[in-house]
Amino acid sequence: MSDDTILNLQGLTKAYGKAIALDNIDLTIRRGEFLTFLGPSGSGKTTTLNLIAGFIEATSGTMDLNGEALEKLRAHERNLGVVFQHYALFPHMTVRENIAYPLKQRKVPKAERVESVDRVLRMVRLEQYASRYPKQLSGGQQQRVALARAVVYRPPILLMDEPLGALDKKLREWLQVELRRIHRELGSTFIYVTHDQEEALALSDRIAVFNEGQIEQIGTAQELYNEPGTLFVGRFIGESSIFEGEVNDGVFSAGGMRFPCSSKVPSGPAALLVRPEHFSVSATEPCTLAPELTNHIEGDVIDMVFVGATIKYTLKTSIGEAIAHVPAVGTMEHGIGDRVTIGWSPSDGKVFATG
């Protein structure tokens, strides 16, 4: 295990009878990183988190924390912080008492407890609420108390399972900023579970994309968005247009149309993925697409939404629906029902074998 590795999972598998919840995954987690497990329900992300926490036992595989066999330790012996969507605060205890509880359980001297609780109260910006009870707090404040309680004893890893899922959008976005700040201040390793791709993109140093009990790809937000390794990752991360067809000798064909592509995949059934910002939209006559946009197809505007800096067009073409985001400033707007031409560069299309 290298110096920058804090947790190493090897061959980790969890089966419930014949049902495989997690299928032989390998994963190296770096010290101090914010790593997010992202995927649909039932993909294995929460199972992995629960295995790390010690709430369930692996069918096979190993987990090493700083070189120590984690699977040999019971949950309370692993000294990991855990925050869930449901805050699980003690209703009869004040904020200060809730946060101090894990320190009392570890028999930390009182003076040190007071200092540690004061420190994390400042960190989560709840100093003025220290004497209140959970029922006197908002949902966001309760979540910050749960976070403070989980980090007050400085665990090497903080595990979070959809902790912001029950909050409204505005509060969730604000707490995402707070989580990034707290992560920087602590310097600890955060492992975060969510099915919300926007949340994953906003928070993470790296993202592990789960699908059907396996990790499809792991990388930074930019890597996953710009260079998806599989069609599933391309669909799941960000918005995209996907056209079904086949590829042969570097040319993607669909609906009688042929589009050169830069992706190297075997000949056969395939899907072409294009991100919405890589499309340009022009009136069909006269067409004003840039000459480098050698791939183009006509389509009809079936929806148009102004989203601030861009206009989002949904277009019906002979090979499927396309979504294009174009700058709203200095752009000629095309209305619903207009016939337009969309174009893209061959290097901006990703082709995946589907056969």
Image (tube, rainbow, N blue to C red):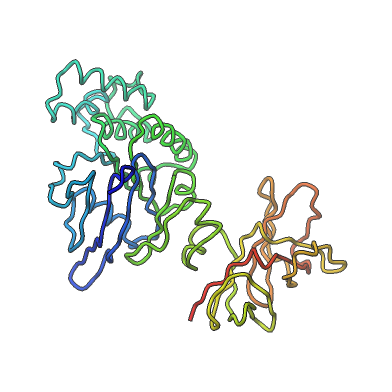
Q: Nearer the viewer, residue 146 or 277?
A: 277
Image x and y of residue 256, in percent: 69, 84
Q: How many numbered circles are shown? A: 0
- Would you place residue 255 above or below residue 338 in this image? below
What is the residue that sits farthest to the top in this orientation?
A: 111
Q: Left or right of 299: which side holds 142? A: left
- For image coordinates 33% across by 62% down, the residue present is 42
Image x and y of residue 316, in percent: 68, 71
Image x and y of residue 64, in percent: 22, 50
Q: Nearer the viewer, residue 222 or 160?
A: 222
Q: Left or right of 97: which side holds 330? A: right
What is the residue that sits farthest to the front in this orientation?
A: 2
Q: Quadrant of residue 110?
A: top left
- Would you place residue 32 above or below residue 97 in this image? below
Q: Nearer the viewer, residue 147 or 295?
A: 295
- Would you place residue 267 above or below residue 312 in this image? below
Q: Quadrant of residue 188?
A: top left
- For image coordinates 51% across by 64% down, the residue present is 235
What is the residue that sits farthest to the right in this orientation?
A: 286
Image x and y of residue 249, in percent: 62, 81
- For image coordinates 34% across by 62% down, the residue present is 43
Q: Quadrant of residue 314?
A: bottom right
